[in-house]
Image (tube, rainbow, N blue to C red):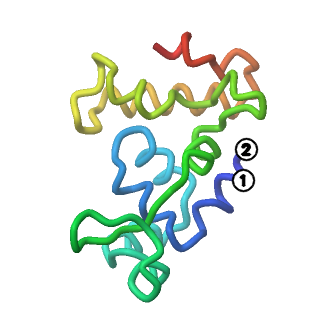
Amino acid sequence: YTAQVRELLCLPFARRFLTQGGILWRIALQFGPNTLVQEALAGPSSAVTLWRSGESVGNLWDDFVTPEEINTLLGRSSSGSESCWPPNDVWDSSKKWKGFWSDADEAWFQFHLANLSSGNLQAPKSRRTWK
């Protein structure tokens, strides 16, 4: 999982995960290269600025991440039944999520990261369990 995520976060569009906020933002901060925040602040990748390969809203363009890339970041299993991290929509609709990363969110993240890192087979959960 970690190797796949680190590889994903080295791609030019990976800065987009930071602009998504929430759990995607935090995972990207944890596993991304040291330059990821700087890349996010620099704006869309050259794929967007030169080739308009991304998503647009009116005259504004940004990098695009696919559902498969989001699933990779979340550590979704090949069967799709479990993930290392809660799906983004589940995270965003959680009563605990207040729209900003709190100390409680960080404590939960670090606890869960330690569980994953220890090889705890109970750490990945189904979508239903994440709710």
Task: Give the residue pinned by disc 2.
Answer: 1
Front in this rendered view, residue 115 or 23: 23
User: x and y percent of residue 54 in the render?
Assistant: 44, 69
Q: Give the vertical position of 11 relative to 65 (above or below).
A: below
Front in this rendered view, residue 100 or 72: 72
Position of residue 100 in the picture relative to residue 3 (left or right): left
On the image, which quarter does residue 10 sit in?
A: bottom right
Residue located at (46% from left, 68% from top): 36
Task: Give the residue pinned by disc 1.
Answer: 4
Q: CA distance from mark 2 to mark 1?
A: 5 Å
Q: Secondary structure at mark 2?
A: loop
- Quick one: which residue is furthest to the bottom in this view? 50
Q: How many marks?
A: 2
Amino acid type of the residue that numbered disc 2 sits on in the rendered structure: Tyr
User: x and y percent of residue 31 in the render?
Assistant: 57, 53
Label placed on residue 100: none
Amino acid type of the residue that numbered disc 1 sits on in the rendered structure: Gln
Image quadrant containing the N terminus: top right
